[in-house]
């Protein structure tokens, strides 16, 4: 029965989670006990949320961790069994038994005694790894233990190993911090968006109405506070359910993949333009009145159900103002994948629910609220301009993927300058829109916001002449996707091989502006050139619509130490996985991942190479390989810490030179 449960769980894991997972990284080291005795140490680095099982598990349990050491030539003997750390023993809900497992990092040690000199011992480990909801299939990983080298080489190996261990720790910390920062940024932006939605004409005037209802319906103050809390929680539940539905219907990995889909980006460009036009006053987007009437009738039932339907009525009636904001948030959060849509909807609904619940609980606070007026429409118009600016990000991503050069960097920045410049004029009272009230004077708040928008507009102007604009690096196209990649006057930054060889680039190479990093976009051509010049190869699996790729190229690559290595120490091969240009007739082959399906586009070829060879399908993804196309160091993904990224590059180059 337990084995059947494992098979079902394993099958579910394969069919439900299509992304490639590799949660355990193995490394080896050797401890010398005497001239003939050594400890072979196998270290497992386990990703957060996963666990590795012990070598000793009960019958009908999971696959145990097993070590095999190749002693086919009889050069050593095993002294005892492979030992393991204490780990933790838990009541496993999947196998319904007590099982010992390991999390985080653990080591296994095998003591051996040599019968004759030997330089290395080969082996392998078989293991199974699970998290709380799924298990991966049993996996075998080859192990190599180096026992005997000359003193200098051994010292170098130990030094490099220590550096790699330190780097691995730094990378894990950076990844964890970046992941947490990403979700916190989603929550913070969503919370601010919810607060902005609260200050729109559809929502703000409903606060006194809601407070009046609870004041009349509640028998005493305690009941009023209780009902207010239930009302606020109901608002949060409604919007969080919406975020959960989006994630559940499409799937986390599918949402992330949509970010590079041409039609996804074009459709949402059109959708956001419609949202923006609505906010600017051309028309209103409303749900059918019958929906609001049916929900409103349920709100009269009283009790918990009645309060919940009151919250639902608020969501429906205010849809003309909240709908565009919610739609934009879901699109942005969906492109990040994972739990981002749920976190986004929680932040948005929390900002709306808090004021309603607090004012319903303490109605006396209503006296401190500003009166409704034209300023509510001003908030709505400002949101419309922001929606319009964001819309061009999606159109730009579609243009980048198709490589039609319709919306190059200068054009994109010019459009943003026009949008935010117009917004500044609006805030200063120089432009009026259909639903604006007559403006006799400008408030201090409106003037301050206008100055901020004007300053931002002026900040973007140098971008037309090649300025990097780091504040908005995630939005416009990369600098090489430009009419004048080096800026006006064709000026170049930095020095090195790239700049010196500008007039004599090898076949298939080009320079990445504005830093003059020489790069290839074809794997075979780049590898051939690396062999010719005797340098290691850095594979850059990237995408035209990859926001984090642009952040790395604009914020990390220009750092002096990193830039020097990229220009002088490695051969860079940038492989765009979303390149929609068709393959040449002779290059069309059958997919290894989907038998029977042909690879038609250049991007499909590079995406499959990354997935098959390196067991990863996210971008950016960086790999340093030698001339035999073997990894020199474990690959890294998005790594915004420039110091850690430089350290990773240096170790890869150092390993190549050994």
Image: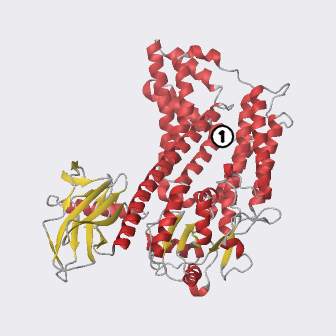
Picture residue at 54% right of the left edge, 52% below the top: 334
- Tell me which residue sits at (57%, 48%) in the image: 330
Residue 147 located left or right of residue 185: left
Q: How is the image coloured?
A: secondary structure
Please provide percent x and percent y for residue 33.
20, 65
Extreme residue toward the front, this view: 151
Viewer-side residue, 12 vs 525: 525
Residue occupied by mark 1: 286
Secondary structure category for the residue under label 1 = loop
> Is 296 placed above or below 107 here?
above
* Left or right side of 36 for 119: right
**Depicted 489 relative to depicted 596: above or below:** above
Residue 156 percent across, percent down from the top left: 39, 69
Residue 637: x %, y % from top left: 50, 61
Q: Is residue 467 above or below residue 518?
A: above
Please indicate whether residue 650 sits to the left or right of residue 378 in the image: left
Name which quarter of the figure residue 503 lies in: bottom right
Q: Which quadrant of the figure has residue 270? A: bottom right
Image location (x, y in percent) of residue 187: 53, 41
């Amino acid at each position: 029965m337990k084995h059947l449960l494992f098979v079902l769980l394993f099958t579910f894991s394969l069919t439900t989670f299509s992304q490639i997972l590799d949660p355990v990284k193995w490394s080896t080291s050797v401890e010398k006990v005497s001239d003939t005795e050594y400890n072979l140490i196998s270290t497992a680095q386990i990703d957060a949320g996963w666990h590795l099982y012990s070598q000793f598990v009960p019958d009908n349990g999971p696959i145990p961790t097993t070590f095999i050491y190749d002693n086919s030539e009889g050069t050593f003997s095993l002294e005892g069994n492979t030992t393991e750390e204490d780990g933790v023993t838990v009541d496993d809900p999947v196998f319904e038994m007590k099982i010992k497992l390991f999390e985080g990092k653990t080591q296994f040690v095998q003591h051996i005694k040599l019968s004759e000199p030997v330089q290395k011992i080969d082996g392998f480990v078989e293991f199974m790894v699970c998290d709380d909801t799924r298990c991966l299939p049993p996996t075998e990983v080859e192990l190599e233990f180096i026992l005997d080298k000359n003193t200098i080489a051994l010292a170098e190996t130990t030094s490099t190993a220590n550096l790699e261990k330190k780097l691995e720790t730094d990378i894990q910390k950076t990844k964890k911090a970046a992941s947490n920062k990403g979700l916190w940024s989603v929550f913070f932006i969503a919370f601010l968006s919810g607060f902005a939605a609260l200050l729109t004409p559809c929502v703000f005037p409903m606060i006194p109405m809601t407070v009046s209802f609870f004041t009349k319906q509640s028998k005493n103050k305690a009941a009023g506070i209780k009902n207010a809390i239930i009302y606020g929680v109901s608002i949060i539940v409604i919007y969080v359910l919406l975020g959960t539905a989006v994630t559940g219907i499409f799937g986390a990995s599918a949402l992330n993949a949509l970010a590079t889909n041409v039609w996804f980006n074009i459709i949402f460009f059109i959708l956001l333009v419609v949202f923006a036009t609505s906010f600017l006053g051309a028309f209103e987007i409303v749900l059918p009145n019958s929906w609001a009437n049916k929900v409103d009738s349920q709100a009269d039932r009283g009790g918990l159900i009645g309060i919940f339907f009151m919250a639902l009525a608020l969501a429906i009636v205010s849809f003309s103002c909240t709908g565009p904001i919610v739609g934009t948030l879901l699109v942005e959060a969906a492109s990040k994948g994972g739990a981002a849509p749920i976190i986004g909807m929680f932040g948005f609904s929390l900002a709306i629910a808090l004021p309603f619940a607090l004012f319903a609980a303490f109605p006396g606070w209503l006296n401190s609220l500003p009166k409704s007026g034209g300023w509510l429409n001003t908030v709505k118009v400002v949101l419309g301009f922001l929606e319009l600016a964001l819309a061009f990000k999606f159109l730009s991503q579609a243009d980048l993927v198709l490589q039609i050069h319709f919306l190059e960097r200068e054009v994109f920045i010019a459009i943003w300058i026009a949008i935010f410049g117009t917004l500044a004029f609006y805030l200063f009272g120089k432009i009026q829109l259909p639903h604006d009230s007559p403006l006799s004077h400008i408030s201090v708040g409106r003037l301050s916001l206008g100055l901020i928008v004007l300053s931002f507009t002026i900040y973007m102007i140098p971008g037309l002449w090649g300025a990097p604009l780091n504040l908005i690096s995630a939005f416009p196209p990369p600098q090489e996707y430009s009419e004048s990649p080096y800026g006006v006057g064709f000026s170049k930054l930095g020095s090195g091989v790239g700049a010196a060889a500008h007039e004599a680039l090898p076949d298939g190479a080009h320079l990445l502006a504005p830093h003059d990093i020489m790069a290839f976009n074809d794997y075979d051509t780049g590898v051939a050139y690396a062999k010719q010049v005797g340098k290691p190869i850095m594979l850059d699996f990237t995408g035209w619509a990859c926001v984090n790729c642009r952040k790395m190229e604009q914020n990390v690559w220009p750092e002096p130490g990193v830039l020097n290595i990229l220009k002088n120490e490695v051969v860079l091969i940038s492989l765009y996985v979303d390149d929609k240009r068709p393959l040449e007739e002779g290059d069309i082959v059958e997919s290894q991942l989907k038998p029977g399906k042909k690879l038609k586009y250049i991007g499909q070829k590079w995406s499959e190479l990354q997935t098959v060879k390196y067991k990863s399908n996210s971008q950016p993804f960086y790999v340093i390989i030698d001339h035999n196309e073997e990894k020199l160091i474990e690959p890294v993904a998005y790594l915004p810490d420039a110091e850690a990224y430089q350290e990773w590059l240096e170790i890869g180059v150092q390993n190549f030179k050994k």
